[in-house]
Image (tube, rainbow, N blue to C red):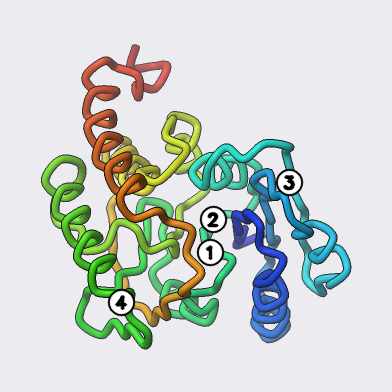
Amino acid sequence: MLISFVVPMYNEEKRIGKTVSALNDYLSKRNFGHEVIFVDDGSKDQTLKTLSNLKPKFSHKVITYPNNKGKGFAVKTGALSAHGEYILLLDADMSTPIEEFDKFYPHLNQNTVLIGTRKGLGAQVKKPQPFIRQKMGEVFTLLSSALIVPGITDFTCGFKCFPKSAQKVFERSVINRWSYDPEILFLAVKFGFKIHEIPIVWVNDDRTRVKLVNDTLLSFIELLKIRWNNWQGHYSLPQDV
């Protein structure tokens, strides 16, 4: 199996149809071995029932648990259950069209983590975020680059591809909510993986659940937690202890 697609979900009953339709169309035209892992992060709506009724045509499984734990926890859960040689993380809203994986395909490498960027030359943001949210995101990127991993232009784009050998990144990750992106990239670099950014197409979904002030402040605090965790040795692999 080449690719495991990991799709975290929380209250996605109104969007999961679009997700399944896009994956049905894309995967029916590709001949690589694959699985799709839907991780339901304690949804309170009819996400699971809707997904079941859609009857996806591709190979898939659903992981669910009763209480919402955060997108980072859902991503970690899906990544650790993946069997593919590579693990692609993607958002249920398909803000990055699944077809963008074709740009990743030539760069697949067991030593490299591929991440989509909305900032690089060649990226296309067809529908941008509102001005204030965009500026807050830019500040978060600057802080993440200064504190966590220098040189990355886009930490929070949900379209990321890890080799299976990078499952140890998710084994050591502890942040379950908004700053899980910088944490997993920090761990990837710590464990010797290269980071390669690929410009992608992206369309903002206005139904974002981010609470601008509260979640932004929490994210900044979590950036400091990443540095603290590393200093305390919490990210060390067993053989490093």
> What residue type is disc 4 on?
Pro
Query: Can you tell which of label 1 and label 2 is closer to the viewer?
Result: 1
Q: Do the numbered discs 4 and 3 sit on residues whose CB atoms are within 8 Å?
A: no
Mark 1, residue position: 91
Residue depicted at 78% across the width and 71% down the height: 58
Residue 217 falls in which quadrant of the image? Answer: top left
**Residue at mark 4 to residue at mark 2: CA–CA distance:** 19 Å
Mark 3, residue position: 63
Alpha-carbon neighbours of circle 3 within 10 Å: few (<14), some, or many (≥20)? some
149 horizontally vs 95: left or right: left
Residue depicted at 35% across the width and 19% down the height: 234
Alpha-carbon neighbours of circle 4 within 10 Å: few (<14), some, or many (≥20)? some
Q: Do the numbered discs 1 and 2 sit on residues whose CB atoms are within 8 Å?
A: no
> What residue type is disc 2 on?
Ile
**In front: 18, or 218?**
218
Query: Can you tell which of label 4 and label 3 is closer to the viewer?
Result: 3
Quarter of the rendering occupied by the C terminus = top left
**Residue at mark 1 to residue at mark 3: CA–CA distance:** 16 Å
Residue 165 position, x and y percent, is: 48, 43
Q: Do the numbered discs 4 and 1 sit on residues whose CB atoms are within 8 Å?
A: no
Residue 146, numbered circle: none
Vertical position of residue 102 compared to residue 116: above or below? below
**Residue at mark 4 to residue at mark 3: CA–CA distance:** 30 Å
**Residue at mark 1 to residue at mark 2: CA–CA distance:** 13 Å
**In front: 44, or 190?**
44
Mark 4, residue position: 199
